[in-house]
Image (cartoon, rainbow, N blue to C red):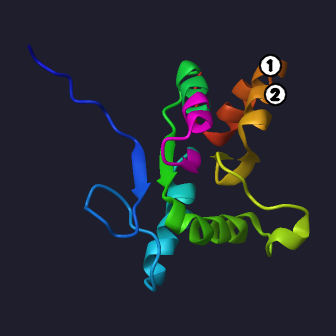
Amino acid sequence: MQEAIPYRTYLHASGGRGNDGIGIGGSNTTDVKTVSKTVSENAVVVFGRRGCCMSHVVKTLLLGHGVNPAVFEVEEIDEADVVSELLRINGRKGEDSGGGIQFPAVFFGGKLFGGLDQVMAAHISGELVPILKGAGALWL
């Protein structure tokens, strides 16, 4: 019996382990720049911990709307580096601005939208589709 080869949009922040994704961490500053590059090059990006069920829910909801989000899986050891880079992208200095970024973090059109609760609230209120169209993730 033949097996289907899955189409993967997962980007692994694996700290340089393996060659199946993006390496984050260590002293190589160009690796941290891949976070901002991922945000700027994709209409929808979901940052989440590896194996997080809430990240899966966000991805499934977006797939149901016809959006194929880039999913950036963050390893526990790389979490601090990724969060600091996401805060920099979002224009915050750190935790003193009223709270940090929590996973899953969803970016639409290069801007932080929020987490699972904000995405679900927008979906329930009917605001999610216009936001996705504005971000360039939906054309119809």
Task: Name the foreground residue: 18 vs 110.
Answer: 18
Q: Is residue 56 magenta?
A: yes
Residue 121 on image: x %, y %: 81, 28
Q: CA distance from mark 2 to mark 1?
A: 5 Å
Task: State the mark number for residue 124.
Answer: 1
Please report the residue visible at 58 percent of the width from the left and 45 percent of the height from the top.
46
Q: Residue furthest bottom?
A: 27
Residue density around tag 1, few if under 14, some if 14–19, many if 20 or more, within 10 Å: few
- Which amino acid, mark 1? Ile
Q: Work out whether residue 24 can be spotted.
A: yes
- Residue 61 sits in quarter: top right
Looking at the image, residue 35 lies above or below residue 26: above
Foreground of the two, 63 or 110: 63
In-image side of 91 versus 14 (left or right): right
Report the residue that reaches farthest toward the top. 1
State whether residue 57 is above or below residue 32. Answer: above
Residue 29, how many percent across, how many down? 48, 82
Residue situated furthest left in the rendering: 1
Can you tell which mark lies on residue 97?
Answer: none
Q: Residue at x 58, y 64 (%)?
A: 79
- Asked whether, in this view, residue 89 is left or right of residue 94, the answer is left
Q: Are marks 2 and 1 in contact (CB under 8 Å)?
A: yes
Q: Position of residue 102 (x, y in %)?
A: 72, 53
Residue 57 in the image: above or below residue 24: above
Which quadrant holds the N terminus?
top left
Provide the residue span drawn in magenta. Answer: 45-57
Q: Disc 2 designates what residue?
A: 121
Q: Residue, x 49% and y 41% (percent of image)?
A: 51
Q: Amino acid at mark 2?
A: Ala
